Image (spheres, rainbow, N blue to C red):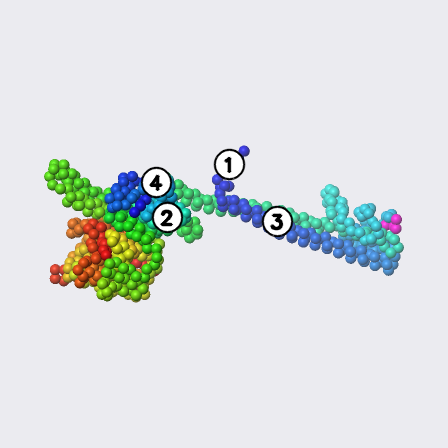
């Protein structure tokens, strides 16, 4: 049966914490185990050394003065409250004297033998207490057997304390780690829950929902910021689409209505047997081309805005682009008796889609050519602004656009009153503006060179690209 | 010329086939990608016109498959997708030219004929000759009836394209694409001025004009 754990136990941070707790606990355990081995070993070694020293001193007494001197010495030592246990046995193992009844050494082959055993003591209130003890037994020169032992109680108690400390600290590590993990994961998952909540609400179609940026500048803030930027862009793009839909409807409906009316009239005329439909059909074809052109531009704008950036950008010199476009337009201007000049700064670099930028520049020039009367002038200029931005500008000596209309002129699908009769106008500059925006740049409209005779004041269209 | 039309819009395909038949070509039709592929494998064609978005198999896959099988028949893609990236996709899949829908019929026929012509010129010529007009591609010189004609670099390229497609209509859009390498239509007819300059250089002082304007289509260089 699957047990459904509370949410916090299922969070990734919590699982991670558990893993860390496990790791820490193992490390702590290994570390403390080493300390234990080191201390416990040290305690035994110290006891053994003392026993060894005592044994040597007794053997020395025996060697110098014989068994009686040893007995004497044992009595003295016991009286002096030495912390040793003694036992002296005859050659065949009968007890001669000592502070214990029998040797804890069970099998004695004659060589010095160590033993670990327990002594029973009586404490202050009469209870029996068992102490761990160590002892050394060896045969003396004439065959008697001597055992020297020592209570290892104190050292053992020390080791026991260490062991208790070990367990306590492991428990503490686990406990603290667990608690810390809970705390951290609660914190983390609360932030995550906030984000998940935002995502959920957006998924359900709510607009304008944004994640909270706590100002901690950590990766959660980064994530929240990223999510917010993504949502902003999504919303802009959605609005763009909606606007595009409205605009397409608006911009295509009127020419289509006109087209329909023309066809209808022609049809009725032909049906009534009066006149020839050729003229009307030719007109209708022209109208259709106009509609298609508008549609193409609307589509380009919509796709640029939806993408948010120009596709396949490359680095290139804007002077080359200006030269190419000039080569295309200069003869055309000459034909219309418009003075064409290009002034381009050298060694600039821009980053963008060359095709789109060429189209933008061509559209600006188309506009300029369209509105500049014979005898006028058009100037294409490429320069670096003091801000480091690259500016491609076209100045003409046409009627210009009144200041109050300039903003509107680059908005989509706006056709200014005085250009009402020019086919295809209106989308040119808005497409240019969309291209500029897609390159992180902008379009600026200002007055041209001013009024000269019946010409001017002209229009200056500046296409500004960010520094590459 | 035998032309395979692979297009799922029956009405558009009808109109296309009618127009091409009137222009003296033979048309075979495939109503979707799979039919188109079968037809292309079955017969020999001079040009294939392939719609990009079709049921069962899209145009890119169709042409890609044919190219892998070694079929080098020139392909003109038709598509409602006209951005630079879309063209690149089409050409990378093995298409030879790309025409965005909707198109004017003269544009379509001019491109089809240009593609078929390209196939004929298998060998490399250093000298182009159309009637009295001679172009030396290495010396970069042009003569008409032995008289040297001085051309600007772009005029040279323009004339080269016209000479390679002599006798065919070429549209303004084609010139803009193939000579200037721009894939958009300027609103003003900038190309006309370039043509008229070229015309004044190659036809001035000669009885018979070679560079013709084709009404409703574009231009044609006649021998």
Q: Are marks 4 and 2 on the same chain?
A: no
Query: Where A439 falls versus B34 (above or below)?
Result: below
Residue B11 in view in this figure: yes
Distance from disc 3 to disc 2, alpha carbons, whole Å, reads 48 Å
**Residue A410 screen position, x and y as percent:** 23, 52
Which residue in the rendered view is the most extreme toward the top? A1
Bounds of the magenta segment:
A88-92
Asked if the residues shown at circle 4 and circle 2 are in contact, with their CB atoms under 8 angstroms apart, the answer is no
Q: Characterize the local packing of mark 4: few (<14), some (14-19) or many (20 or more) Cα atoms within 10 angstroms.
A: many
Distance from disc 1 to disc 4, alpha carbons, whole Å, reads 54 Å
Q: Residue at x 80, y 47 (%)?
A: A104
Instruction: Find residue B32 and name its label.
Output: 4
Q: Are marks 3 and 2 on the same chain?
A: yes
**Residue beneath disc 2:** A230
Q: Disc 1 sits on a residue from what chain?
A: A
Q: Nearer the viewer, residue A350 or A107?
A: A350
Q: Characterize the local packing of mark 3: few (<14), some (14-19) or many (20 or more) Cα atoms within 10 angstroms.
A: some
**Foreground tag (1 vs 4):** 4
Q: Main secondary structure of the magenta part?
A: loop
Instruction: Find residue A4 and name its label.
Output: 1
Q: Disc 2 sits on a residue from what chain?
A: A
SS assignment at label 3: helix
Instruction: Find residue A29 and name its label.
Output: 3
Residue A91 among those drawn in magenta: yes
**Foreground tag (2 vs 1):** 2
Q: Residue A116 vs residue A383: left or right?
A: right
The quarter in which the N terminus of chain A is drawn is top right
**Residue B185 screen position, x and y as percent:** 25, 52
Q: Nearer the viewer, residue A47 or B201?
A: B201
Q: Disc 4 sits on a residue from what chain?
A: B
**Foreground tag (1 vs 3):** 1
């Amino acid at each position: 049966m699957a047990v459904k754990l509370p949410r916090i136990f299922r969070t990734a941070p919590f699982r991670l914490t558990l893993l860390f707790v496990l790791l820490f606990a193992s490390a702590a355990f290994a570390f403390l185990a080493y300390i234990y081995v080191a201390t416990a070993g040290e305690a035994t070694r110290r006891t053994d050394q003392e026993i060894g020293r005592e044994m040597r001193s007794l053997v020395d007494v025996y060697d110098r003065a014989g068994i009686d001197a040893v007995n004497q010495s044992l009595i003295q030592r016991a009286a002096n409250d030495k912390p040793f246990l003694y036992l002296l046995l005859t050659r065949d193992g009968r007890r001669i004297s000592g502070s214990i009844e029998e040797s804890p050494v069970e099998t004695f082959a004659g060589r010095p033998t160590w033993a670990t055993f327990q002594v029973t003591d009586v404490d202050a209130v009469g209870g029996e207490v068992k102490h761990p003890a160590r002892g050394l037994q060896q045969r003396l020169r004439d065959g008697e057997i001597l055992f020297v032992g020592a209570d290892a109680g104190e050292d053992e108690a020390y080791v026991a304390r260490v062991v208790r400390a070990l367990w306590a600290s492991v428990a503490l590590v686990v406990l603290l780690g667990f608690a810390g993990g809970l705390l951290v994961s609660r914190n983390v998952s609360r932030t995550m829950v906030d984000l998940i909540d935002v995502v959920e609400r957006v998924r359900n179609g709510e607009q304008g929902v944004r994640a909270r940026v706590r100002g901690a500048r950590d990766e959660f803030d980064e994530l929240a910021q990223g999510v917010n930027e993504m949502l902003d862009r999504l919303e802009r793009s959605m609005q763009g689409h909606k606007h595009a839909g409205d605009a397409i409807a608006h911009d295509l409906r009127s020419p289509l209505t006109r087209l329909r009316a023309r066809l209808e009239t022609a049809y009725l005329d032909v049906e009534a047997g009066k006149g020839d439909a050729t003229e009307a059909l030719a007109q209708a074809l022209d109208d259709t081309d106009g509609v298609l052109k508008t549609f193409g531009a609307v589509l380009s704008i919509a796709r640029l805005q939806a993408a948010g950036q120009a596709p396949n950008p490359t680095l290139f010199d804007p002077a080359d682009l200006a030269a190419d476009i000039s080569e295309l337009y200069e003869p055309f201007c000459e034909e219309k008796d418009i003075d064409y000049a290009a002034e381009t700064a050298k060694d600039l670099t821009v980053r963008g889609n060359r095709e789109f930028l060429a189209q933008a520049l061509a559209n600006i020039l188309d506009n300029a050519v369209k509105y500049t009367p014979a005898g006028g002038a058009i100037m294409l200029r490429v320069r670096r602004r003091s801000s480091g931005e690259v500016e491609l500008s076209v100045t003409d000596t046409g009627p210009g656009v009144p200041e109050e209309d300039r903003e509107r002129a680059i908005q989509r699908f706006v056709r200014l009153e005085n250009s009402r009769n020019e086919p295809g106008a209106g989308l040119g500059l808005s497409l240019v503006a969309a291209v500029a925006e897609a390159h992180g740049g902008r379009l600026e409209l200002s007055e041209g060179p001013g009024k000269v005779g019946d010409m001017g004041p002209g229009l200056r269209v500046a296409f500004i690209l960010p520094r590459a | 010329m035998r032309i395979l039309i692979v297009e799922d819009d029956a009405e558009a395909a009808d109109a296309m086939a009618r127009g091409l038949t009137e222009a003296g070509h033979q048309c075979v039709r495939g109503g979707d990608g799979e039919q188109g592929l079968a037809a292309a494998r079955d017969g020999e064609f001079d040009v294939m016109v392939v719609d990009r978005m079709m049921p069962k198999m899209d145009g890119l896959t169709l042409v890609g498959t044919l190219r892998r099988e070694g079929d080098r028949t020139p392909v003109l893609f038709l598509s409602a997708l006209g951005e630079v990236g879309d063209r690149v996709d089409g050409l990378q899949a093995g298409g030879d030219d790309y025409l965005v829908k909707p198109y004017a019929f003269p544009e379509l026929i001019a491109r089809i004929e240009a593609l078929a012509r390209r196939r004929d010129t298998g060998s490399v010529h250093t000298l182009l000759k159309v009637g009295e007009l001679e172009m030396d591609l290495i010396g970069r010189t042009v003569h008409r009836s032995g008289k040297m004609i001085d051309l600007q670099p772009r005029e040279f390229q323009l004339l080269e394209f016209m000479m390679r497609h002599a006798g065919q209509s070429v549209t303004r859009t084609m010139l803009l694409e193939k000579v200037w390498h721009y894939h958009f239509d300027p609103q003003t007819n900038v190309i006309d001025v370039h043509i008229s300059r070229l015309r004044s250089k190659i036809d001035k002082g000669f009885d018979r004009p070679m560079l013709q304007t084709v009404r409703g289509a574009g231009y044609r260089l006649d021998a």
